[in-house]
Image: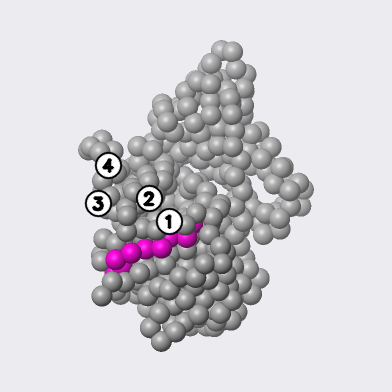
Amino acid sequence: MSKTALVSGNNWISSALVFRLLKEKKADKVIWLKPVKPHMPAPLPSLDKNLGGSNWVELFREAGLFEDSFEEPEEGLGLREFKNRSFQVPAWVSSPNPKDRMEILKDYLWGPESNMAPAIELTFPKPWSDYIGELREILGKDDRIDIKEGMEIISCEKTEEKIQVRLSSDDQVTVDDFYYCGDVSQFGKIDGVEKTFEVGGKRIRWSDVNRKWKPFGAVQVEFIHSIALNQFTATSFFAPITRDSGETSHRHLWGSFFENGKRSRWTVYLTAEEQEDNHAIARKIRKIKQTLNKMFNGSDWLPSNCKEFTDTVERETVRLEENFLYTESPRLTRAISVLDTGYLLTDQFGPESISVQLATVFGQREIKNSSPDIAELKDIAESTV
């Protein structure tokens, strides 16, 4: 009997989910709702090998995204910290033990930053999240997928065996399986869904998610340069930015060059208050540029006709994403069950949780420990993406 699945989301995990649903034959047809605003590219071009990175590599390989051997990622030390006017290996790399590395990393970095920085790095020929864009192009040509651009869910109703979903176009669709991959804090606004959900052994109201889990936003600036600035595109960087008056967090700028140094992408995380404050966002964008001017200067980086990094910029694109990460939530050990037979999956808990959530959907074991260590995360992450 033919099965139809509905997937709502335009982010990393939704792309992996749609690919796997069809590959594992858990759905014969997928209705894929893509909100108007896509997920911003990842702040760093690399992934953590032990926290799902190897699984993304396998998925990209299965999708045919590595055309030849030179595109295969490698384990390495591509990330560099700009400190004391020089580029240095991050402090956590000093330990050969993966668990110790993660502990050092968590202590060294500000909350949201520690959720994205790799302890054991897999470097790619281009930013890893750019492969997600290529995967979306492949999926867009699959006639088993009905893509509905700019479409949102208005209401859901669970019947005996099916789920009826009303869309923002006022159309109704009936599906066998339901997967919501959007902003966790927005799910509770859908008519017909439960008022609470369970995670970490506790029930939480959807309306309390942001208050209890402390969301962080992100502002990202992407530049097109007049000249290639860094031929070593496997290298990525982070550097401290100047604090605002009264600011206590020690935060960093994160980013890299790509397309042979003709483009670069730089991200700073925002507090819940900052992500709603246009003036605070504008200040952070200025600090991004000021920091880049300090990092990349002199003849080693700049042509003779440019005094500063920003002199090389031909065009820039600014992206803002609210609720990019949650850092004070219980560690997510499985996808969140909704509508009895459906699931909520999200990128908002950091890359370490993506494989764990997908494992729930595809019948792999879940992590029982509420605070699993690196070895346990690696064990479950190796089972699926």
Label for residue 140? 2
Characterize the local packing of mark 1: few (<14), some (14-19) or many (20 or more) Cα atoms within 10 angstroms: some
Characterize the local packing of mark 3: few (<14), some (14-19) or many (20 or more) Cα atoms within 10 angstroms: few
Which residue occupies the extreme left position in the image?
69
Q: Amino acid at mark 4?
A: Phe
Label for residue 62? 3
Q: Secondary structure at mark 3?
A: helix
Number of the front mark, 2 or 4: 2
Q: Earlier in the sequence, mark 2 or mark 4?
A: 4
Assess whether residue 29 is covered by the magenta stretch.
yes
Picture coordinates of residue 228, whole percent (x, y): 47, 23
Q: Earlier in the sequence, mark 1 or mark 2?
A: 2
Q: Secondary structure at mark 4?
A: loop
Q: Amino acid at mark 3?
A: Glu
Q: Is residue 317 visible?
A: yes
The span picked out in magenta is: 26-34
Which residue occupies the extreme front position in the image?
171
Magenta stretch mostly in which secondary structure? Answer: strand
Q: Amino acid at mark 1?
A: Ile
Picture coordinates of residue 277, whole percent (x, y): 74, 52
Report if the CB atoms under discs 1 and 2 are less than 8 Å apart.
Answer: yes
Picture coordinates of residue 20, whole percent (x, y): 31, 61
In the rendered image, which residue does mark 4 sit on? 66
Q: Quadrant of the N terminus?
A: bottom left
Q: Amino acid at mark 2?
A: Gly
In the rendered image, which residue does mark 1 sit on? 147
